[in-house]
Image: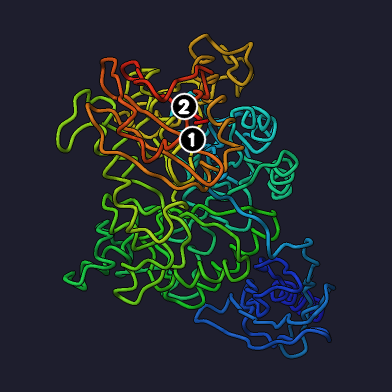
Amino acid sequence: MKKYILSFVLLINFFSFAQIDRVEPPFWWSDMNLSEVQIMFYGKNINQNVVSVSSGLTIKSVQKTENPNYLFVTIDTKNVAAQEFVFTFKNGKNSFTQNYSLKARRENSKFRKSYDSSDVIYLIMPDRFANGNPNNDNSKSTKEISNRSLPGGRHGGDIEGLIKNLDYIKELGATAVWPTPLCEDNDEAYSYHGYAQSDVYKIDPRYGTNEEYVKLSAELHQRGMKNIMDYVTNHWGWKHWMYNDLPTYNWIHQFPGYSQSNYRMTTQFDNNASKVDSKQCIDGWFVPSMPDLNQSNPMVLNYLSQNAIWWIEYADLDGFRVDTYSYNDKEGISKWTKAITDEYPHFNIVGEVWMHDQAQMSYWQKDSKIGAIQSYNSNLPSVMDFTLHDAIGNVFNEDRQSWDRGMVQVYDNFANDFLYPNPNNLLVFAENHDTGRFNEIYKSDFKKYQMAMTLIATVRGIPQLYYGSEIGMKGDKGKGDADIRRDFPGGWNGDANNAFTKQGRTAEQQKFFEFSSKLFTWRKSKDVIHSGKMTHYVPDNNVYVYFRYNEKETVMVIINNNSEKQSLKTNRFKESIQNLKSGKEVLSGKTFDLNNDIEIEGKSALILELK
């Protein structure tokens, strides 16, 4: 009897020993620039094994950490064709195997075209947009359950809801979609925003599956549209599986334990900054529920780089938006960004650099001359134009112009474009998921909405719209984030109206949508707006005039922020008008004689194509 008991115990120990719980990345591709791939094998006491691989693949190194449940195996895939391999793990007489795939890449994957200034980006909070599949509102593997009556709860929006409404987004004139993070966020509350991810290789089951995310890209591409992933390098959520069993103590920043960031991003480049303040900004946690990742740890940096590239290749992505970019270790995030753009030379990445000074923001754009003063290059192609956003948030309530009030704030924003190495690749926006809603700030004033959208549609850079503003949606930031992230009307069965269709919109919603659609659809085919040069004129009487032009076209934009009608003498703009005779307004179709004064109503905008 003792013999059988001993055999049973040995059998249990063998299967316990043999278990691999996770393999990341779960597979890779042949013919990649990143050919040396560090595979993380995770399982109980996995590092007690000697690992080998079937012929055709070379193991470059095996790295163990203080946690015996991890084994990091670096393989060399250079010149290795797509095929299946078998890893063997051996501990004494016991051994087990793990299959691993090297897949073939999509044709021309390396040189995929990303988003640029010819695009209009539509930013969506997926949980609040549309519930395409109510069956996935809750999941056995995640804690928080759907509760649409709770403003900060999960409401059930998902990937299928996005796919079902892509034609609506296309009709609006948007050409790219940026959903906030879709990977699993297993926080017990407020998990809908997705920025506290618990598994970065898995789509949250309440949004759908990895395969459905791939389908989203395919559906977008069929419509000539692009998929932008919201990527988070600075932190994970405290429910991330790895946080509960860290590979190394310094995988995250510890003080020990938690210490909050001071949020002073200027310490990243301030020559006068104390070391303690700089460390507190970069190493401090964003909030207590978001462990701060240590990008100065080569293993962490490699893990994040491989994960980002894996998603691009797997889901056929067209670009990244990177959350809290300037809170990362600046040398580490520069290497992360370069690893991606080395793999995909045309891949665009916009970083959230939430600062209020152009010199400070321009520091973070690739090839910045300001960054070069400190021998720093972020390698980041694009940053978000927060100073323009700041101006838009108050300027349209300033009816009268003074030295630093009114439209001169917008003028001054573009006067500082010389600071940026590539101003045409800045993201321009009136609002996003973290700011006040434009239509709340301006009390649903349609004329002010028209002026703001005209501005971001016609200046340099890449316009970004925030879901629902195109139908007049409001939301009070003072009431909390949930209020600026309301459900899109019509996204749920039983909604009072369906703003996804013309028939379902209210008259007010249709007014906003019709203007937005006409404006951004016009922009789609306008190279002069996408890449043309800009000449602007000092605002006079709170009227801002600028021209976009190339060798073939000239567009004149007039924004009258004065509450009263204004008359413009065109001879002031002769250097831009030159010998052109007339201008046709793109939205109304009205023609203006450029030999005469141009009259423009108070609080309005004109876009004139000059002939």
Q: Is residue 548 left or right of residue 495?
A: left
The single residue placed furthest to the top in the displayed view is: 507
Give 60 or 169, whichever is nearer the viewer: 169
Q: Position of residue 43 (x, y in %)?
A: 64, 71
Amino acid at dot 1: Leu
Query: Does 490 appear above or below 386?
Result: above
Q: Secondary structure at mark 1?
A: strand
The answer to whether residue 134 is visible is no
Give 225 or 130, whichever is nearer the viewer: 225
Q: Is residue 273 left or right of residue 435?
A: left
The reply to whether callout 1 and callout 2 are in contact (CB within 8 Å) is yes
Q: Quadrant of residue 575?
A: top left
Q: Which of the image's four quarters has the N terminus?
A: bottom right
- Which residue appears at 49% of the width and 63% of the height? 244
Q: Position of residue 285 (x, y in %)?
A: 34, 59
Tag count: 2
* Residue carrying label 2: 469
Amino acid at dot 2: Ser
The single residue placed furthest to the bottom in the displayed view is: 92
Query: Does 511 appear above or below 393?
Result: above
Q: Position of residue 301 (x, y in %)?
A: 50, 72
Q: How is the image coloured?
A: rainbow
Report crowding for label 1: few under 14, some 14 to 19, many 20 or more residues within 10 A (C-alpha): many
- Which residue appears at 41% of the width and 49% of the height? 384
- Which residue appears at 29% of the width and 38% of the height? 391
Query: Does 386 appear above or below 494?
Result: below
The answer to whether residue 481 is visible is yes
Mark 1 and mark 2: Cα distance apart in space: 7 Å
Q: Is residue 128 left or right of residue 363?
A: right
* Residue carrying label 1: 465
Q: Secondary structure at mark 2?
A: helix
